[in-house]
Image (cartoon, rainbow, N blue to C red):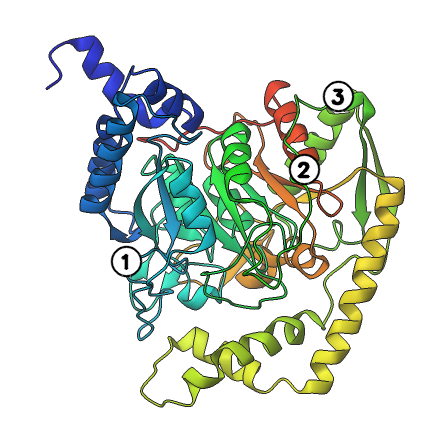
Amino acid sequence: MLDSFDELLGAAMIHHETARGLAKSVMIGERTSLEIVEHYLARADTSDLNAFTLIDRQGALAAAQGVDDARRAGQELGVLAGVPVAVKDLIDQQGRITTAGSSFYRKVPDHSATVIRRLDQAGAVIIGRTGLHEFAFGFTSENDWFGPVRNPWDPRTSPGGSSGGSAVATAAGLASVTLGTDTGGSVRGPAALCGVVGLKPTHGRVPLTGVFPLAPSLDTAGPIARSVGDAAQLYQVIAGFDASDPWSESRHVREPGPAADPARLRIGVPQPWVSKGPVQKAVRDSFWLAVDRLESVGARVEEFASDQLQPAPELTPSVAGEVASVHREFRSNPNNRYGAVVEARMRIADAVTLDEYIAALEWRARLRQAFAGAFEAYDLLITPAVGAREKVIGEDEIDIDGQPQHFRFVLSWFSALVNHAGLPALVLPLQTSAPGVPPAIQFIAPWWQEHTLLEVGLMMEQSGLSAVVAPPGF
């Protein structure tokens, strides 16, 4: 029981502390993991944002007790000791049901996904499984079977998708850090719309063994956090080669260093990708203000032209051909129901021909060549993260300065290309005094350069260009 005002205040602030700070407090005995986990479970239990498909109270408390027992026994603790983590409900966790946000898929795995085992080894406490767009095949997390996940900045609006529950749990302080997946922007879009940090690693950097696929050659798993340092910590835990994953590559995972020196950065703004995008004026103005601020701290930022670096018709068959393959057996059973929007997209996927898929792969190869050429001149590329600051639940269109645009077009314009090239990218909320969720920026780095992204993210935070703020009331 808390018997002093200071103790009460300290408990109330637990969810505003960094994951690294919580782990340190457990390691030195300042707090118990049980205290921290109970705090987060209470918040998750009383939330009306529909961020979770499962809150694992019994399992979380048992894991927290195990961390505390290990500390008292003098055992070495992992870097996430006692930290409450939530994971997207398409990542297998031993003994817990994986639903993939669907009406019919129910799997109780005998083995946890590689990323879950690595979280366990680091001492993390998994408190629950987060909601998502059905089978991760969408950008809203408006789920026909579990209900819509709601954005803490405005519950009338979507957190984006497909990792909407993970972003909401992070932004609303229902978990310290979370894990999502990203096939066309499913970590970065929700991070942007919820005002938090999202990292999409290089394809092949984080093992996908035990993760239900959407499009395997594009799928990635990555952290969503309230600071760059926490994102870096979670990334370092889950990254690294795994022979059981055919997409995994055996490459050294470089630890991020201190904040990048902006004077040493050459940053490119790809055109017409940025100028042609469906972007609201407020988002566009914030992006160019961020460019000015980067230049003011010493970075060299230049626009450059590349007709290849923009969305193309081949995007759809490139993804959909793989989606159809993943779901072919499910779709042969008429009892397997899909939500109306996902069903419509599945029919498009079913119709993709082999010739169309091969042509899309050729386009993808040319896209990679174009990115490689850009990175000969620039260390990083930047774009807005998404073209709008909010998407209203139940509405298919977003107003772009008087012109209605389909939400998928607005929310995927700047993210999907990154997956098709296999590149890493970091989304950060921009510092702003305007009310509402902050606009967000996306940094894109060369393959295997996650450490560069994280060092630049630290620089953005330390220079005051980026900041995560809690939604009102959280």
Label 1: state its secondary structure.
Answer: loop
Q: Is residue 62 left or right of residue 52?
A: left
Residue type at numbered disc 2 = Phe
Q: Which residue is mark 2?
A: 287
Residue type at numbered disc 1 = Arg
Q: Which residue is mark 1?
A: 96
In terms of sequence position, does the residue under pointer 3 or pointer 2 come before the other?
Answer: 3
How far across and down, in percent of the image, does residue 9 sit? 24, 15
- Residue 261, numbered label: 3
Which quadrant: the N terminus? top left
Q: Residue at x 63, y 55 (%)?
A: 204
Q: Residue at x 43, y 56 (%)?
A: 113
Q: Residue 175 is drawn in which quadrant?
A: top left
Label 2: state its secondary structure.
Answer: helix
Q: Residue at x 24, y 20 (%)?
A: 11
Q: Is residue 289 left or right of residue 282?
A: right
How far across and down, in percent of the image, does residue 40 sit? 26, 34
CA distance for labels 2 and 1: 42 Å
Nearer to us in this view, 231 or 149: 231
In terms of sequence position, does the residue under pointer 3 or pointer 1 come before the other?
Answer: 1
Which quadrant: the C terminus? top left
Mark 3 neighbour class, 10 Å CA radius: few under 14, some 14 to 19, many 20 or more: few
- Residue 49, numbered label: none
Mark 1 neighbour class, 10 Å CA radius: few under 14, some 14 to 19, many 20 or more: many
Answer whether residue 153 is visible to the viewer in this image.
no
> In the figure, 162 relative to 191: above or below?
below
> In the figure, 247 relative to 164: above or below?
below
